[in-house]
Image: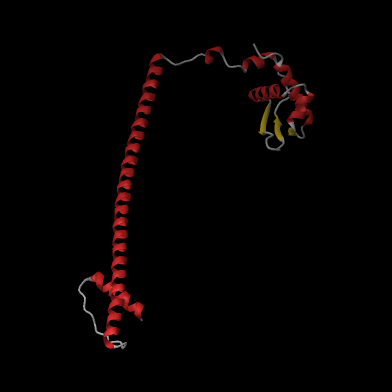
Amino acid sequence: MARTNLHELSSRLLLGLSAASHGGTFEGRLRDVAAEAGLNSVRTAEAVKLLEELGRINVVQRGRRGRDTVIAVVSTDSVTLEDAEASLPGRQSKRGSFTYDEIGRAMVDRLLELARDDGLRTAQAEAFDAEAKMLRARIAELEDELSATTAREEELRIRLRAAEEALIRSEENVRRATGGTSPPTRSITVSDDDSKAVLDILRSRRR
């Protein structure tokens, strides 16, 4: 059975659209025309759908976001109860047409798809875990290198400070031995690279 008086409401809406149209095309607020015909928003949507299915109208543009509704009125023939009932989907089409075999195959396909997705996620997780382990190992290696460099720097600082103190003492001893005059500068030969670096620093400071 068709929805109660939907065919009558559709006919009234069709007449309202035809009366408000210009050259067979309505352009404006569909809500106003529907209200004059006695339709609320729900029944208006049902009536428009029915009129489209029956070929009475052609919706060119729907009124959304401030736009006017544009509808071409194809025919003004009244909608009968038979027209409304014929547009309803048949009872047979509402029933499920799937067989148990089809449902079973669909379930198996879905399970296989889920298994593939799960395997992919597992592989990705393992790859991410391996990458994280490599990064942690590299960080530990860099931290060890930094600790060794810091210790080496501290050792050089200690040697530099000791060399400075030894140089000062030597200069004082020389001044005492020579009666306050500075001795001629002699070139000092060293073999240790670190000692050479310390000596260069001391010479640069003396300048």
Residue 61 drawn at (x, y percent)? 67, 35
Q: Is residue 133 placed above or below 10 in the rendered structure?
A: below
In the foreground, 61 or 206: 206
Image quarter of residue 86 = top right
Image quarter of residue 90 = top right
Residue 34 drawn at (x, y percent)? 75, 25
Q: Is residue 18 placed above or below 198 in the rendered structure?
A: above
Q: Which quarter shows the N terminus?
A: top right
Judged left or right of residue 109, residue 22 is right
Judged left or right of residue 164, residue 77 is right
Q: Which quarter shows the C terminus?
A: bottom left
In the foreground, 21 or 114: 114
Task: Name the residue located 74 percent from the left edge and 29 percent from the top edge.
Answer: 31
Q: Is residue 201 placed above or below 95 in the rendered structure?
A: below
In the orientation shown, which residue stands out farthest toward the left?
191
Task: Name the residue located 47 percent from the left edge and 15 percent from the top edge.
Answer: 97
Image quarter of residue 44 = top right
In the foreground, 145 or 9: 145
Residue 160 drawn at (x, y percent)? 30, 70
Task: Name the residue located 70 percent from the left edge and 32 percent from the top edge.
Answer: 71
Residue 187 drawn at (x, y percent)? 24, 83
Task: Name the residue located 27 percent from the left edge and 81 percent from the top edge.
Answer: 173
| Count of numbered tags | 0
